């Protein structure tokens, strides 16, 4: 099931939403979220509920300084970063609306590789490009999972045939 915990205001009030549940709004709550933000929130909930990660191990909207054309620095945003128990990045995830998944695949995956390389300290283990949608009431997911431990560059991954690990790694104690 999908649940979402949002910080509503500076008074530390939270709203929790679960799929299939009725939604009620407190005063001053903005009831609509951009679709991409909702996808990110849904994946965060899945990472906690389905894959077993602690909410403390997940960071949303992490800015990463990357080299752009070897001349300038530019900020890239990892939609979701999941950290390993010792604090090193485990997964860098980019979330995209389903209608843009195929169109943005090449550029976004290349950017994920750049963000992986720009990480200070330990490098991430996985790069993930993710989307989800509903078809006839059923959740459909599509993701590309790259083992960054095996492929450190977009080019090496491409030369290897662009392998997709085909899963989102579960948290294993």
Image: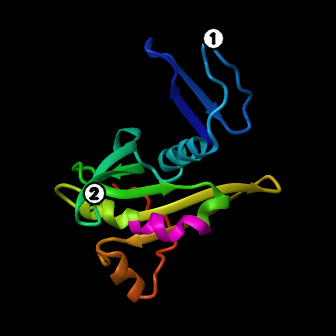
Q: Which residue lies furthest to the left in this view?
A: 121
Q: Which of marks 1 and 2 is in front?
A: 2
Please name whichever residue, 102 or 130, is drawn nearer the observer in this view of the structure.
102
Task: Return the residue at label 1.
Answer: 27
Is residue 106 covered in magenta? yes
Q: Quadrant of residue 34?
A: top right
Q: Residue drawn 72% across and 32% down? A: 21
Say above or below: 117 vs 17.
below
How many numbered discs sit on the rendered protein? 2
Relative placement, left or right, of 142 versus 91 is: right
* Secondary structure type for disc 1: loop
* Secondary structure type for disc 2: strand
The secondary structure making up most of the magenta span is helix
Q: What stretch is highlighted in magenta?
A: 102-110
**Mark 2 closeness class: few <14, some 14–19, many ≥20 residues within 10 Å:** many
Q: In which quarter of the image is residue 151?
A: bottom left
Task: Return the residue at label 2.
Answer: 66
Please name whichever residue, 112 or 2, is drawn nearer the observer in this view of the structure.
112
Q: Where is residue 43 in the image (x, y as percent from the top left)?
A: 54, 49
Please name whichever residue, 167 or 30, is drawn nearer the observer in this view of the structure.
30
- Split into 4 quadrants, where in the image is the C terminus? bottom left
């Amino acid at each position: 099931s999908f649940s979402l915990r949002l910080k509503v205001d500076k008074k530390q009030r939270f709203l929790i939403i679960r799929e299939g549940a009725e939604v009620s709004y407190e005063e001053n709550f903005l009831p609509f979220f951009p679709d991409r933000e909702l996808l990110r929130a849904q994946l965060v909930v899945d990472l906690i509920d389905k894959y077993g990660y602690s909410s403390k191990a997940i960071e949303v909207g992490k800015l990463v300084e990357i080299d752009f054309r070897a001349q300038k620095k530019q900020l890239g945003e990892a939609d979701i970063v999941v950290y390993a128990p010792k604090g090193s990045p485990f997964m860098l995830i980019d979330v995209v609306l389903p209608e843009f998944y195929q169109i943005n695949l090449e550029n976004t995956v290349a950017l994920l590789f750049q963000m992986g390389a720009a990480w200070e300290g330990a490098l991430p283990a996985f790069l993930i490009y993710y989307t989800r949608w509903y078809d006839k009431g059923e959740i459909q997911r599509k993701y590309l999972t790259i083992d960054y431990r095996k492929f450190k560059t977009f080019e090496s991954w491409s030369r290897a045939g662009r392998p997709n690990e085909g899963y989102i790694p579960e948290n294993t104690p």
